[in-house]
Every structure is written in structure tokens, then in C-alpha cells.
Image (spheres, rainbow, N blue to C red):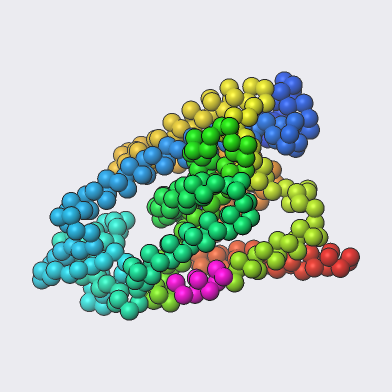
Amino acid sequence: MGLPTVSYMLFGAILGWGILAPLSKYMGWAPGEINDWINGGQGWILWISLSVMISDSLVSFIIVSGRSLIGAYRLINNNNGVIGTTTATTTTTTTTTAATYYPLLPATSGSIGSNDDPTSSAYEYKENVNLITPVADKYLISNTTAVIGIIASTLLCVLCLHLVFGTIVPLYASFVAIILAMLFSVLGVRALGETDLNPVSGIGKLSQLIFAVVIPPSHPARVLINLVAGGIAEAGAQQAGDLMQDLKTGHLIGASPRAQFTAQVIGTIYSVFLSSIVYKLYNSVYTIPNETFRIPTAIIWIDCSRLVTGKGLPPHAYEFSIVFGVIFAIISLLKNTVPKESKYHKYLVYLPSGVAVGIGIYNTPNFTLARFIGGVVNHWWTNKGMDRISMIIFSSGLVLGEGLLSVVTMGLASMGI
């Protein structure tokens, strides 16, 4: 995550668990135990966490969406209304090429010029940029396949929702959720590409906020529908971000997008069954939630649904949520609008990210402290000039080791050992 992000999370943990939660208990607003989701400080600071994440995500969404629309307009306008073609001019020869905006492989004859901005988009050709060879059509996914895939997956999603929930979740709600998932996927991929963070937590909250307007207040299952719809939107953004990272890696090493697509489809079908089986296995061995598996995100989701559908708040949580929401909306506005060329841009790192702070507030401190330690080690590792690849392999080993051994211990527990 990097040192700034984990530092923001640590700030959120100190703010929530060191200041606000004890304050709520002392003042009698949350008289239960601190770690009580319902009557304790943890349940009280949860609303502030939601307010911080929603305000940060809403401001970011508006700004990023506006930039995307402006960028699309300029792209179409520069190409005289034709998307997918442009004219590339090199320093030695002028060549017109029809370059579709698919993953591109670098040409063997040249690359981006030394005076070019390395952060510019891969399909913004400039006069000092040498030709970039498009991937051959045989290695790409056709538009027909993409359209058929979207239609088929949409119908499959609607069918599954109907089989699971019946008429409780109306058809129009399913289609609206899928459309939102498509829009939020673009937002998630854009944010991930620019910041290396996919704001799926905030995206989920935004979708819940929207569905509070879509579903009539009189609907008896509005909380359930809000949960399902938000889950679809967040899942779409999450998967889009993951696949984008896979495709970018393939692009960097010159892999075939079609081969990657085929592998992703196979892996998806395989994981659908495997993840369901593993979840059922966990659920049969452990009581979920418990002290080990607290599933704080699930509590966040249900409480956010209750909030946006008109349920009440604990004492004085409303006032604190408004204040912190406004503060982090202003911070988000600054972080998303101050240009990189500004002399003040370097100071923005000291302004905490709302999503990171919100995560630090609603998660228990041991969760945040572990990540902060990892961020500090990462910062030390890179500052020492040590090989970053080795650090990634080392940290992956930690994750893999714990993950594999957790399955082993779960199996032993299921056998009564």
C-alpha cells in the first residue's frame, strides 16, 4: 500500500479507537463495551467511518467522472468524431496509422522519445513519439465477443438473483445494479491506474446511496435490495480492477490479450465453485462472525443500508458524521484538483485519504497496526536501495504461507484436532 496509505489508516485507528470511541463511552452515547457493534464505541464510530468514506468517494467520483467525460470529448473532437484512429508523426517520417485503443506492443524500431511525458496516456501520440505497433487482430478479443459476453453475463446475473431471491429483488433493480456496476468499473479502473488503489469500498457506498433513491421507501425489502445492488456494483469494480492489472502486466511483457482472456474465463469458472466450497467449509467449522473472523465489512454494509434507507443513528453520531464528512470532502477536493505542477502539490501527501482513514476507524487496531508495520518495512526496504522484486516475493510468501496453513488448521479443526 505504501507508507502514506498505511499512515492514514493508523491515523484513522488512533482517531477512532483512541479518541472517539472512548469519548462516546465516557459521554454515555455508546454505553456498551468498546468492541460492541450495537451499543458500544465500535458501533458508534462506524457511522463516522461511513461518512468519511462516502464524502471522499463522492467528491472523487464527481471529479474523475468529469475528467473522463472531458477527455472523451477531446479525443473524439481531435479525431474529427472518429474514435480509434489517429495520426502519428515521427521525427524522421510522417505515417498515418489506424491504431485501435487496445493493449499495444512496443515497436522494435523505437519507443517514446526522451522529451515525452512518461505519464501521458499510451494512445496520445505526439510529434516526438515514434510509432507504436498495434497488436495484431488475431491476438485481440473481437467486439462481437465483448458484446455477447456482456449480454450473456448480464442475463446470467439477473437469472442468479432471481433464483436466489425470487421476487424480493425486482428485475428493474437487478438491471440498474448491473448498469451501475459498468459505470463504477470505469471509475475503479481509472482510479486504480492513476493511484494504484481501487476505491471499491467507496464505490459500494455510492451504489447504496443511489439505490436508496431508486427503491421506494415503502418497499418492505429495501435494505436487502440495497445490499444486493451495492454488492453487484462493488464486485464489478473490484473484478475490473483485478483484470486490468492482469492485462497491463501482459501488455508489458507482450502477451496475447486473447490468451489472457481465455485463461481468465477458465479461472473464473474454476474459482466460482472452489470459493463456494471453501466458504461452506469455513462456515461448518467456525461460527462466523466470531473473535477471529469479525467480518467488519459486513457490518459496514448492513449499517450503511440502514442509514441510507432511513434508519436511526446513535446519539450525536449524526453531528460528528456531518462534521467529519465535510472535512474529508474538502480534503478530497484538494487532493483531486491541485495540479501536479503546483508548488503546493508536494504537501498534499500530509492530507489523509478519506477511504484509508475510514478503514482505519472501522477495523480493529490490530488489523491496522499489522499493515502499518508492513508499510514501514516496505519504506525501509526501498529506501535502502534493495531489490523491490525480492521484497514483493518475500511479502507474497508471508501471505501465501498464512493462507495455506489456515486451510490446514481449518481441516484439522473440522476433524476435532
Quadrant hosting residue 397: bottom right
Along the line of sight, the residue nearer the viewer: 155 or 206? 155
Quadrant occupied by the C terminus: bottom right
Residue 177 in view in this figure: no
* Residue 228 vertical position relative to residue 320 in the rendered view, above or below: below
Along the line of sight, the residue nearer the viewer: 361 or 51? 51
User: Over which residues does the magenta segment extend?
Assistant: 261-269
Along the line of sight, the residue nearer the viewer: 394 or 257? 257
Along the line of sight, the residue nearer the viewer: 116 or 241? 241
Q: Residue at x 43, y 66 (%)?
A: 149
Q: Is residue 63 left or right of residue 32?
A: left
Name the main secondary structure of what is drawn in magenta: helix
Q: Is residue 107 magenta?
A: no
Q: Residue at x 56, y 32 (%)?
A: 217
* Residue 363 vertical position relative to residue 325 in the rendered view, above or below: below
Residue 20: x, y in percent?
66, 29
Residue 333: x, y in percent?
40, 35
Q: Is residue 78 left or right of residue 141?
A: left
Q: Residue at x 55, y 68 (%)?
A: 268
Q: Residue at x 49, y 55 (%)?
A: 236
Quadrant hosting residue 405: bottom right
Q: Residue furthest right?
A: 416
Q: Is residue 262 magenta?
A: yes
Q: Is residue 263 left or right of residue 376?
A: left
Q: How many marks?
A: 0
* Residue 6 vertical position relative to residue 110 in the rendered view, above or below: above
Residue 202: x, y in percent?
51, 43
Quadrant hosting residue 398: bottom right
Q: Residue furthest left?
A: 93
Residue 208: x, y in percent?
53, 41
